[in-house]
């Protein structure tokens, strides 16, 4: 999984430079889609500007998650879970969570919830936080007009469960780092591996991402 996913990003970089070919696993396409959505029309921009700061956080994270889901190869137009959006709106001050807010975010984590539970029925956990640790296979960040910096990470834990995390802000994190993260499971997604096969993935609205001490 690791080699094929890394190779996919090398291939994407080549495609972007040469302007030919196509792939479904381009994080750069996520940023492109998100930038387009964020500035698609004056009326939409005005509506977002009129929203409260809390609602903006939920809107931006939902847009990023859906853009990533579409880049993975899923159909455009899927609805972002209303329960997740309500949770993100209510607790917007935890996205991202830094300093003392990390402890507050951890209070919403159910330590008994594992990827197998989410994969079985993610709807039970749309309004909850999970916590896990894994290796960063890829991370990209970009400044999006009207939104700010968005980071997108692909993290795989020791059991080879795959997470794609969207995070509002920049991170002092790089490929091959081991990170701990806290966030809301929003969508069950996945993508074709370049070398064959398919990787199931859970898209997380990230609250906290940091290098692991272990």
Image: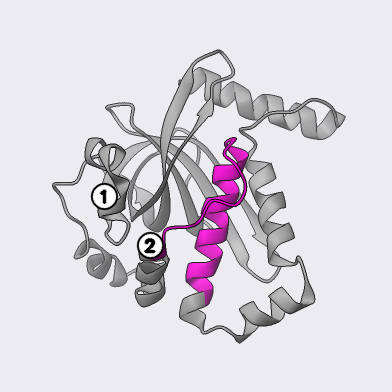
Task: Give me the residue at 53% from left, 58% from top.
Answer: 170
Instruction: Please state if 183 lies on the left or on the right of 57 as rendered.
Output: left
The C terminus: image quadrant? top left
Quarter of the N terminus within the rendering: top left
Q: Which residue is mark 2?
A: 84
Residue that carries the numbered disc 1 in the rendered image? 131
Q: For residue 58: magenta?
A: yes
Give how far apart the Cα atoms at labels 2 and 1 are.
16 Å
Residue 169 visible in rendering: no
Q: Which of 188/155 is in front?
A: 188
Query: Is residue 131 visible to us here?
Result: yes
| Stretch of the chain drawn in magenta | 56-82
| Residue 144 drawn at (x, y percent) | 68, 62
Nearest the eye: 3 or 187: 187
On whether residue 15 falls in the magenta region, the answer is no
Between 205 and 46, the one nearer to me in the picture = 46
Point 55% across, 65% down: residue: 60
Q: Residue furthest left?
A: 112
């Amino acid at each position: 999984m690791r080699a094929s996913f890394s190779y996919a990003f090398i291939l994407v970089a080549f495609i972007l430079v040469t302007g030919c070919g196509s792939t479904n696993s381009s994080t750069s396409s996520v940023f492109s889609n998100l930038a387009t959505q964020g500035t698609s029309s004056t009326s939409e921009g005005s509506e977002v500007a009129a929203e409260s700061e809390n609602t903006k956080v939920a809107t931006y994270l939902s847009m990023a998650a859906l853009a990533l889901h579409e880049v993975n190869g899923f159909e455009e137009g899927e609805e972002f879970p209303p329960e997740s959006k309500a949770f993100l709106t209510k607790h917007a001050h935890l996205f991202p969570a830094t300093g003392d807010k990390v402890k507050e975010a951890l209070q919403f984590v159910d330590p008994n919830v594992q990827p197998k539970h989410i994969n079985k029925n993610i709807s039970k956990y749309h309004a909850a936080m999970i916590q896990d640790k894994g290796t960063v296979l890829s991370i990209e960040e970009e400044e999006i007009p009207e939104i700010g910096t968005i980071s997108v990470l692909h993290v795989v834990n020791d059991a080879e469960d795959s997470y794609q995390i969207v995070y509002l802000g920049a991170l002092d994190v790089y490929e091959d780092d081991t990170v701990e993260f806290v966030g809301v499971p929003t969508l069950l997604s996945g993508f074709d591996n370049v070398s064959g096969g398919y990787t199931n993935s859970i898209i997380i609205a990230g609250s906290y991402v940091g290098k692991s001490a272990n």
